[in-house]
Amino acid sequence: MGRYVPNAMIRGILVPTDFSTCAEQALHYALTLAERSGAYLVFCHTLHAPLATEPAPKRVQQLRHMRDAAEHNFQELQKRLPMLGNLPSVFRIEEGNLQDHLRHCIPDDRIDLIVMGTRGADGIAELLGSNTSDTIRRAPCPVLAVPENAPLRPVRRIAFATDATALRPEALQPLADLVALLDAELQVVYVEATSARPGTAAHPNRSVLEAAFPQASVSFHQIAHPRVEEGLAIFMTQHATDLLAMMPRSHTFFDRLFKGSHTHRMALHSTVPLFTFREN
């Protein structure tokens, strides 16, 4: 799929859209980032091909109608959001599923960030939906998943949830880019499932994190909760977090958000966008 380019600000933003309210909510976040970074926008709408059992002429006609409808919907979107006219952008209509399209779109269009909408639900797997969770797992670049009820307000506080797993300074570059673009405060949240009192232990990666964000306002916090996912949700409420950042690595608490039982999965705020980035 290509690789995220470290030490480079965001140049290209991919915005998958089905023209739903959910997708349009994510677009507002993409517009803010594009304005601040000077990035171009690549809109992607995927078409599900008609059944192969349909006669060929009918399939061609159905695809033509779907393409026409998508073009019309994009024109209506441009009317509702005139600021789109001030930003470089391209609209692509692709047949097949989103994941197939990402394989060539990310390197071909030099995409550094994917911004996509999610529908609210009780657990994080349901919150993200199959398309978004698949994208987080497979995309080589960062992904910003925006819930449909996310407030349209400036992102002032970003919580980076991490555990004791060692971090490399260069791996934090995508988050450093985001923090700088939004001029946001960074709340580093050390998550562990123990009975220790919050704040009693130093963050194991503190020196690395301080070096990675020399210009940002960074605070360090510890969550000690038998269910780290619930503890994180409590922290975000108490500290008015606007956006949550995580690195999706195996054998960490992030992995448990997807693989745990329903009753133990995180009941994330359906209003907090989730920014994920990989350790390349």
Image (spheres, helix red, strand yellow):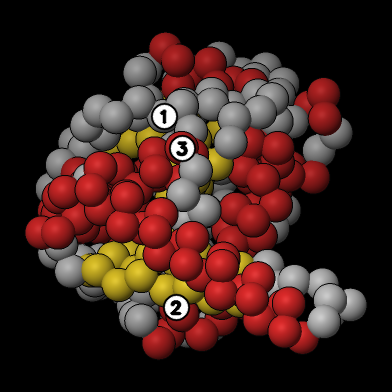
Asked if residue 45 lies left or right of residue 214, the reply is right
Visible in this render: residue 33? no
Q: Nearer the viewer, residue 254 or 49?
A: 49
Q: Considering the numbered disc 1 on the image, is that residue within a helix, a strand or a loop?
A: loop
Amino acid type, callout 3: Thr
Q: Amino acid at mark 1?
A: Ala
Q: Amino acid at mark 2?
A: Ile
The x, y position of residue 119, in whole percent, is: 58, 36
Count of numbered labels shown in the rendering: 3
Instruction: Say which of marks 3 and 1 sits in front.
Output: 3
Helix, strand or loop at label 3? It is helix
User: How much space separates mark 3 and mark 1, taking CA atoms?
Assistant: 11 Å
Task: Return the residue at label 2.
Answer: 106
Q: Residue at x 33, y 65 (%)?
A: 13
* Residue placed under numbered mark 1 in the picture: 150
**What crowding class fits label 3: few (fewer than 14 Cα within 10 Å), some (14-19), or many (20 or more)?**
some
